[in-house]
Image (cartoon, rainbow, N blue to C red):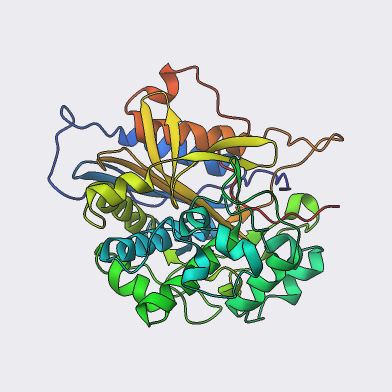
Amino acid sequence: MKRAMIACLAALSVGATTLSGTAATAQDSELDRQRLRQTLNAVHKAGMYGTYSHVADGRESWKGAAGFADVDTRRPVRPDMVHRVGSITKTFTAVAVLQQVGRGTIELDAPVARYLPGLIPGERGQRITVRMLLNHTSHISDYDHLIFQTVEDLDANRFRTWQPQELIDLALAASATGQPGVAPGEYSNTNYVIAGLLLEKVTGVKAERYITDHVIRKAGLRHTSFPRSPHIPGPHSRAYEGLSGLIDPPRDYSVYDMSLAWTAGAVVATMEDLSRFYRQLLRGDLLDAGLLAEMLETVPLREGATVSEYGLGIYPLDLPCGRFWGHQGGVIGMTTMSFSSPDGDRRVSMGFNLTGYVRFDENGNPVPHPIDAAVWDHVLAATCGPGAAAATDTAPPATPFPLDRIPIER
């Protein structure tokens, strides 16, 4: 994935922070609000157009914003803006599928062909199981690199409405990335589009409706939805894509038909809703203990040259203060991350409105960008508590938050 390096913005606009839940004194507070504000401001100063964050520790929370929702008008970002969360949608979809597992209508280790005969042709459909879809070991190719091959493809597909079957057919026509069930897996949006069709088959209702009724509403999320048009519902930022200098200056793609992502990446939400979602999930409010344990069982996953761990629509992030669980998401012009401690108490969710800012050297390796280091500092301050970012000498991973996957080459 290629991202453009963008010059820092000279001005700074910071949204108000708030405290919710039971009041806490400075002595018993685990949230260093001053440090959180400083590190979030630093993300904007490093070059990110606009960013917003929600941090929580138990019933205490903080939210803030820094930068611009519109770089032309200098309209500031606000903490409660609705944001395209991209592949964080996969966690919602996985929860919905696992709920059906709990009801006995789906078996995790049953072949997809049992529920969707003929969708995946031949022996392949008998070998690929539901679990392999959710943990990306199906080795069905991703379709996004087939849709986005040139810069012009971003604009050509802006208002195109894709049917799930079209996306699946594109992927199945491409070469498989390996043998079904063999680790490491290969990340593929196609898996979660198929999971959406599976939901529809066993529930008899549209996947968006099932996920809305049984996951989004069950979690008490008030500002989370599948948009019904190319527009983001509610107050939102613009979405700027630079493609590592291929689009200069970065172009706004906040109006975009997200049918190309569907149950793999079309959800919009606020950062506060995302934090609540992962708290509810990890505390066992959306799935029983057995199903949650299945969700957190990981396999090796390969993305490019990197091998990490992946569960069923969720994955771990190991920090100096312990293991957190969540997901990241990237669509054209917007990226997101949301992670929670295993008990659901300590959480951070962040949204960004500029993608494609990283440059690459002559060997194709990403050049470290100040934005990434600044984001890492904010995540450490949010998750590991007061002084963590300053006290630890833990460097960010080479690609700590690989949020957008548009594989357009120069």
Residue 19 appears in the rendering: no
In this rendered view, identify the residue nearer to me: 147 or 33: 147
- Asked if residue 283 lies left or right of residue 401, the reply is left
Relative to 184, does residue 122 appear above or below in the rendering? below
Residue 107, quarter of the rendered image: bottom left
Tell me residue 346's x, y (percent): 29, 38
In this rendered view, identify the residue nearer to me: 314 or 234: 314
Number of marks in picture: 0
- Asked if residue 222 lies left or right of residue 156, the reply is left
Relative to 106, does residue 7 appear above or below in the rendering? above
Tell me residue 239's x, y (percent): 59, 63
- Asked if residue 328 lies left or right of residue 5, the reply is left
Kindly identify the residue that appears in the image at 40 percent across and 52 percent down.
15
- Asked if residue 273 lies left or right of residue 241, the reply is left
In this rendered view, identify the residue nearer to me: 100 or 386: 100
Tell me residue 207's x, y (percent): 42, 75
Tell me residue 293's x, y (percent): 31, 44
Residue 43 appears in the rendering: yes
Residue 71, quarter of the rendered image: bottom right
Kindly identify the residue that appears in the image at 47 percent across and 81 percent down.
228
Kindly identify the residue that appears in the image at 41 percent across and 59 percent down.
94
In this rendered view, identify the residue nearer to me: 169 or 250: 169
Relative to 40, does residue 252 appear above or below in the rendering? below
